[in-house]
Structure formats: C-alpha cells, structure tokens
Image: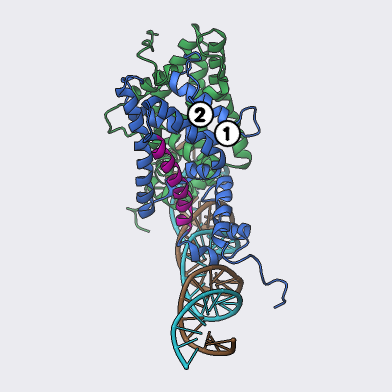
Chain colours: A blue, B green, C brown, D cyan
Amino acid sequence: MTEQDRPRVPRGQARDRIVAAATDLFARLGYEATTTRQIVEAAQVTKGALYHWFSSKEELLTSIYRELLAEQTARLETIAAADGPADVRLHRAVSDLFAHMDEHAEPLTVWARSMHLVAGEHAAAVRAERRRYQHLFQDLVEEGQKAGAFRPDVPASVITNTFLSSVVQIHRWFRSQGPLTRRELGEQMVSLFLDGVRGTALTPQLPEY
Amino acid sequence: MTEQDRPRVPRGQARDRIVAAATDLFARLGYEATTTRQIVEAAQVTKGALYHWFSSKEELLTSIYRELLAEQTARLETIAAADGPADVRLHRAVSDLFAHMDEHAEPLTVWARSMHLVAGEHAAAVRAERRRYQHLFQDLVEEGQKAGAFRPDVPASVITNTFLSSVVQIHRWFRSQGPLTRRELGEQMVSLFLDGVRGTALTPQLPEY
DNA sequence: GGTCACCGACCGACCGCCCGGTATGTTGGC
DNA sequence: GCCAACATACCGGGCGGTCGGTCGGTGACC
C-alpha cells in the first residue's frame, strides 16, 4: 500500500456525493438502467459507503424525491396560507413552482420517470406526501372556484391533475438551450392554464409581493 | 411425454398473446421490472416463441408503441386534412384522441413510462414517427393562430407540448371506476385547453360530422 | 495529558441469483 | 419433405446486496 492512493475523498462528504451522482445518473439513464457500480464510481466512493447510508437502491431513489417534495410542499404551504384572493395566490404558487424548478429540474426528471417503480412501504410514504402537495394545490383551486374566479363546471381535481401533469412532463421536451428560459415558459404555461388557447392577453402581471 | 400436455395453445396465436401479455405487464409493473419469463408465462407460451417473433425485449416494447402510434397518426391525418376551420378540426382531433384512448389506454401507459429507455436504432425510428404526429398537431395549432382563433402570444410548440403532456399523463391519476368516464374527462380537458380555468362555459358543442 | 476503549464512517472483495438471450430439437401444415 | 412455428434446456454475465475488516476521531478515566 503506497501513500498516495490512500485519501480518496474527504470524510463526511460521501452521502452528498452519492446523492448528487445518483440524481445525475438517474436523470440521464433512468433508475433501472443505472447500476450501483456506476453511482459509486461517479461519486468516487465505494459500495460500502452507499449501503452505509442507504438500505437499498430504492431508498436512494425515494430519498432524492422526498427531499425535493418536502421543500416544494413547504413553499406551497407558505404561499397558500398568505393573504389575498385565491387566484392571485395560485398564480404566485405556480410562478414559484417554475422558479424552483429552475434549480431542481434533475430530481424532478428522476421522479417523473421512475415513480412507478417504487413499491411497498416506500411507495406508501411518498404517495402520502405527494397527496399532501396535491391537496394543497387543489384546495386553492376550489377556493378560487367558490370565489367565482375559476369556472365551476370542471372539478378541481381535474384542473389540478391536468396542470400538474403538464408541469411534470416539461423535462420531456424543454431544452434550456432553446429560445425560452424556464421562467418564460412558466409564465406562458400559467397564462395557458388560466385563459386557454383562445384567451387573448387576459392574464395580468403578478402584483409585487 | 404424455399425450395430454402437448397442445398448449392453438398455432398462430402466439404473437398476439405475447403482445397482449407484455402490454399488460409493462403497463402494470413497468418495462424494466417485467421479465421475459413473466411475459411468456402470462402468454402461455415459451421463450422460443417470444424470440421467434421479436429479436429482443426492447423490440417488443417499441413494436407495441409503434402500432398504437401509427393508428393515431393515421386518424389525425384524416381529421387534419378535412374541411372546416382549424379550431374545429383541432377540437375533433382531440375528441377523437380521447375516444381512441378508451380502447388503448394500456399501451399508452407503457410508452409514457418507458419511452426514455429505448435507445439506439429503435429510438431513432420511433422518435421520427412521434415527431410526425407532433407536427401534425402543431400545424393545426398554427393554422388556428393564423386564422385568429387561437392566441398568437404563446408558441404553437408550447401549446402542443403542454396539451399532449397532460394527455399522456392521464393514466397516472385517472381511474375508470371514478365518477367520470374517459370521454367526459376528455371534453373537460378540451374545454380547459381552449378556455382555461377562468373561461366560463365558452366551449361550444362539437357540430355533428 | 496520555492512552485506550469504542464507534461511526467507509472500504472492497465477494456472493448467489436471475436476467436476457441462444442453440438445438420437435411438430404440424402445405 | 421442408419450412415456419414453436418448445426446451441451457448459458454467461452482471446485478443488487453483504460482510469482515480498517481507519480516524472522541471522550472517559487515571
């Protein structure tokens, strides 16, 4: 054993490196197509480190998403609990969602592609958290309907699912090298969401807050 | 070898049985999580039959989708080439899409979940066909924009991708045991698409055709 | 303030299963 | 009799996961 090949990576960084490498690989190759060997190689650690921090490959996947989801839920909660009419709060929430997606596009891609593979106890926990987010959003829509700002003839659940579906799928076609930034796309999608393809420039600018 | 365990399945049905079993399993478990053994077991055939008709597991996956996509494209072509204003044709196309999805929800689920896994030559071929479909749809949107029926401030590509994304994702949340039929949901989503959440009951009924 | 027991963090060789795919045999219809 | 249409037995590899061990820090105790 020579001296030079000893200190690979500073101690205490392994977990973060594993999560970062796994997120990147999962997003690019897909969860199932990524092997644990690729992950530890990219993270410059070993299998021992991986299974020291995570009990299974699946737990690694779910923890990536739970972290993202927890942050999104917290943000939505704050915005939903604020003052002001429901439609304005919804507009803020959606804009905030897009802004946040700028920084976390990768884990969202991972989840959009691999959520259906998670089963058992992990699935139940994550699904519960996901439902919580969905409900927060849906409640805002319902509030807007009761206040007369949104159409009442389409159920809030349909509205919510339709919109969130199109958001989750953005990674499939949006390229950051394209003519639009993710935030610009966000504003356009909000406008489509609110007024549809027939709507003219009805959507007002967000009031400062 | 006894006589009775010989004729398992009538000849000439193997391919169809394999496709049906694979579609069901892929939709329920995901492509990667489904093994070729599960497929042949469910189809009541053997590995020999599978690899007689398909050169690989991946070709089986792509052929499922290409079959569906070819049919959808043909339908869209017919509708798009018909007479009448672009917005009416688009409305017809979308309604037809939902009607057709009634019968083919499973293969669409398969593809929505597993398209990102297809690589190499298969990917190129399928992606080209997929682009053809997308372009047909997008051309209709652009026509509508030029005719003044649709808003010009959002690019047709954004409109197309946003809408098709939400359609592809329906399987994630829609349950046929729920209060809505898939066709009813379709009408609501078309209405949302055209007029947004703020729109009142602006969307007219489809003229008979 | 030395030392020693202990502990979490991490290493890396190893395992057994099971997966996609194949090579060869068999059969029924034309 | 010959060829598609299958059946059956089998393989090599790579996968997720394991397990005994190492190493650096930390604190209790004298």
Where disc 1 sits, the SS reads: helix
> Residue A21 appears at what percent x and percent y?
58, 54
Q: Which residue is mark 1?
A: B126
Residue A202 seen by the camera: yes
Q: Is residue A77 part of the magenta span, yes or no? A: yes
Image quarter of residue A72: top left
Query: Which residue does the image show at 54% across and 47% down from the upper left?
Result: A30
Of all chains, the one bearing label 2 is B
Q: Nearer the viewer, residue A166 or A200?
A: A200
According to the picture, the residue beneath numbered tag 2 turns out to be B69
**Does the stretch in magenta take in B15?**
no
Task: Check contact, mark 1 vs mark 2: CB within 8 A.
Answer: yes
Three-letter residue code for mark 1? Val
Spatial CA distance of label 1 from label 2 is: 9 Å
Magenta stretch, residue numbers: A57-79
Horizontal and vertical percent position of residue A144: 34, 25
Q: Are marks 1 and 2 on the same chain?
A: yes
Left or right placement of residue A128 versus residue B68 in this view: left
Total numbered labels placed on residues in the image: 2
Question: Is B188 above or below relative to A28?
Answer: above
- Chain bearing tag 1 is B
B117 versus B105 height, above or below: below
Graded by Cα atoms within 10 Å as few (under 14), some (14 to 19) or many (20 or more), the crowding at tag 1 reads some
Residue type at tag 2:
Leu
User: Is any part of residue B30 visible from this angle?
Assistant: no
- Image coordinates for residue B183, horizontal then vertical, percent: 34, 23
Q: Residue at x 34, y 57 (%)?
A: B2
**Which one is in front, B31 or C30?**
B31
